Image (cartoon, grey):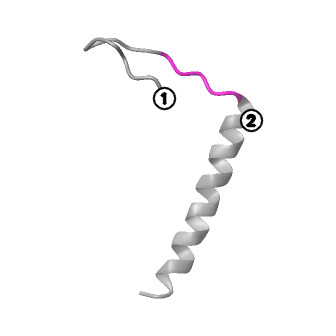
């Protein structure tokens, strides 16, 4: 990830459809893991 060079500088980040699919899958798996961990509470 590239940080803005100056304060107040904004950069637009565009993700590919494949990247969005990967992020959705990781989020789904994280939710499943959190549910499993709740059983130990």
Between residues 39 and 8, which one lies in front from this camera angle? Answer: 8
Left or right of residue 17, residue 41 in this image: left
Query: Which residue is outermost to the bottom?
Result: 40
The residue sitting at 51% across, 71% down in the picture is 34
Please name which of the two marks, 2 or 1, marks the residue nearer to the observer. 1
The residue sitting at 47% across, 80% down in the picture is 38
- The quarter of the picture where the C terminus appears is bottom left
The residue sitting at 69% across, 45% down in the picture is 22
Residue hosting label 2: 18
Residue 26 vertical position relative to residue 36 in the rendered view, above or below: above
Question: Mark 2 to mark 1: distance in Å?
Answer: 18 Å
Query: Which residue is outermost to the left?
Result: 7
Kindly check if marks 2 and 1 are in contact, taking CB atoms under 8 A apart as contact.
no
Q: Where is residue 27 shown, x and y percent of the image?
A: 59, 54
What type of secondary structure mainly makes up the magenta span? Answer: loop
**Sequence-first tag of 2 and 1:** 1
Q: How many marks?
A: 2
Give yes or no for residue 23 being in the magenta stretch: no
Q: Quadrant of residue 14?
A: top right
Q: Which residues are magenta?
A: 12-16
Mark 1 is surrounded, within 10 Å at the Cα level, by few (under 14), some (14 to 19) or many (20 or more) other residues, namely: few
Secondary structure beneath label 1: loop
Between residues 35 and 6, which one lies in front from this camera angle? Answer: 6
């Amino acid at each position: 990830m590239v940080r803005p060079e100056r304060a107040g500088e904004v950069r637009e980040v565009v993700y590919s459809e494949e990247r969005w699919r990967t992020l959705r899958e990781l989020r789904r798996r994280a939710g499943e893991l959190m549910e499993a961990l709740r059983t130990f509470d």
